[in-house]
Amino acid sequence: MVDAAAIDRPLRDFNPWPAVIVVCLVCLAVLFLAPTLGVLLSSVKTTRDIAFGELWTIPDTLFLGNFGEVIANPAVHRYILNTILVTVPATAASIALGVFAGYVFSKLPFRGSDVLFLILVSGMFFPPQVILIPLFRLFNTMGLIDTLWPIIIVHTALGIPICTLLMRNFFATVPNALREAAILEGANEWQVLMRVALPLSLPAIAVLATLQFTWIWNDFLWPLIFTNSDEKRTIMIGIVNLKGQYSVAWGVQGALSLIASIPTLIVFLFFQRYFIKGMTMGAVKG
Amino acid sequence: MADLRLENVSKRFGDVQVINGVDFAAKHGEFVVFVGPSGCGKSTLLRLITGLEETGGGRIFIGGADVTGMKPSKRGVAMVFQSYALFPHMTVEDNIGFGLRLAKLPKEEIGRRVAEAARILQIEDLLERKPRQLSGGQRQRVAIGRSIIRDPKVFLFDEPLSNLDAALRVQMRLEIARLHKRLGATMIYVTHDQTEAMTLADRIVVINRGRIEQVGSPIDLYDHPANRFVSGFIGSPAMNFIDVNEHGPENCTSLGAGSASIELDGCQVAGATAIGIRPEHLELAGPEEGDFPATVEIIEKLGAESLVYLQFDGSDLPLTMRTSPEHPLCAGETVHVRFNKDRIHFFDRDGKILNRP
Ligand SMILES: Nc1ncnc2c1ncn2[C@@H]1O[C@H](COP(=O)(O)OP(=O)(O)O)[C@@H](O)[C@H]1O
Ligand SMILES: [Mg+2]
């Protein structure tokens, strides 16, 4: 027998908060998804349709001309190549530096290493606008303006704090006994890192790779500052550059925006299978 | 020749002197157990021997060679960690063969030696598994496998059984003893459990606060402890300690117990401030022969024997007595207890044992 009072009670004690939270989340989701939807819709419409204010309607027929135009455009190929040339080395370099620094901070601390770590991590809270002009002047004297180098260097440097922070904290969860066991077996510090600590830290690497890749790929500011010729532009600036002489090419821009987001999606899908917890389970006790 | 020799080894962490001038030598093939309470420096001592921790002073010799400044992997020692420290991302096979692969031995030889170690430890069918797919006892074997494959001069075990449940602990204890017989290697085994020490050791080293209190065979330590610490630490249940009254009658040891006192006639050692007596050296007696009356507080019937927790009448001094289970005792009963006077240990003010005249 079910107690009748027990069924009534939830009605009397109606809790409004879950409903409020759901409404808020829905609003936020709509707010975030609307631009994406707009881009998606504009990419499959002709410039003419968009110009007539047909942006938010669902089209009867899919117009794929925008995609064709973007894919056939040699400038777009150049943008994508440039972006890859910036993103891949900068992502790899910042993670590599974070791995080394994080390993030292967590497993080989030295006098003052805690303070150094704090200083390093505080770099995360530095607004880029502050260092923008000095950096421009620096790279200008070095003759690197309008090459990809400044973008790679700056993204590598800006990635170090977050990479070091994450790697240090992840390495800290790798038991010290594992390092000591490996050393007793004849491993040097490099082998401990490569054969023990790093394989156990794949989740952290995957998170960092996704974060850094997306962030650098989508960056607009630094390529804008450090490059000026069309041959050196990256994809995010390319999207803006893709306009007719007299009109804004909404459809083509929408198509390129979608194409430009594919690599980050692939990177996410590739790395997300490593986003698993408990890699160190079974190392000790259990 | 000594396989392991420590000469005046010491170590401090900051202001804390953790190891204090330890001198010790283990003969070839000996099974030595370092035993002492938690935090006394046992693990630190092992880590000094391995070289994972730098010595603060003194020298360490392994197989006759001075290894004091040598790299851990060159010292010819292997260690089984308390936490096993298996590499979680590697299979059992890769865990065991890790050191050989680092040494770049040929694949066939690694395979052969891993198979040999696996056979000795009976883990042949686990070679493909990862550590998380193993039970505690199996992990323990893998950890031992990783140490024996390198054929070290000295094996070091740091509380290897403390993560296992009681039944498994007894089983693994036997297996380690068998392994020692089979390999004939020098083994240094660290534990805080005196039972483990008593059952496994050829020789026990009792450590307290970073110092060696006494070295000897298990029976030696049990029958002839050097001081009050060793007396209390070795043996379970622990030895009973009773203070000696300063102004007792002549030619007699007077034991203080609150308002009451016990007079042990014809049994006196000058300078004794306390005595110790093991639970099996107290016995039930008739009212005439008994040295003192006591109240039975709790009886633990263990089957082969019973442990009786007594309270001196007129005091709160607790005493433990080991008796045969035939005695029909019940809690609250008053009994008469007699000391086996030949087995009383006398201690001076500093806890050192006093020889009987
Ligand atoms: N790396 C270290 N830094 C500072 N103190 C330590 C360190 N390692 C151990 N100690 C201290 O040394 C003492 C002995 O530790 P340990 O050798 O682990 O004891 P045991 O293994 O006998 O339980 C403890 O008081 C511990 O706090
Ligand atoms: Mg310890």
Image (spheres, helix red, strand yellow):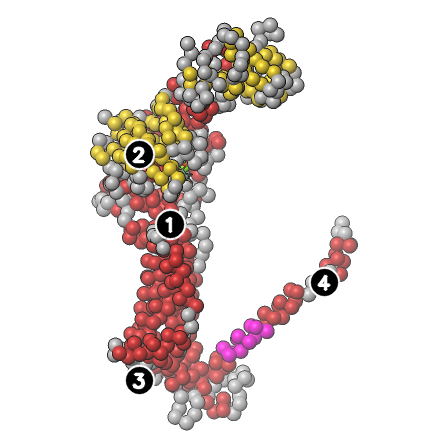
**Which residue occupies 60% across, 20% down?**
B258
In primary-sequence order, the first of circles 3 and 4 is: 4
In the image, is residue B348 above or below residue A63?
above
**Which residue occupies 40% across, 66% down?**
A123
Q: CA distance from mark 1 to mark 4?
A: 49 Å
In the image, is residue A259 above or below residue B282?
below
| Residue that badge 1 annotates | B89
Residue A8 percent across, percent down from the top left: 76, 58
Q: Which residues are magenta?
A: A27-37
Does any portion of residue A216 appear in the rendered image? Answer: yes
Q: Which mark is residue A229?
A: 3
Question: Closer to the camera, B249 or A130?
Answer: B249
In primary-sequence order, the first of circles 1 and 2 is: 2
| Residue that badge 4 annotates | A14
Secondary structure, magenta segment, majority class: helix
- Tags 3 and 1 touching, CB below 8 Å: no
Q: Which mark is residue B9?
A: 2
User: Is disc 4 on the same chain as disc 1?
Assistant: no
Residue A110 percent across, percent down from the top left: 34, 52
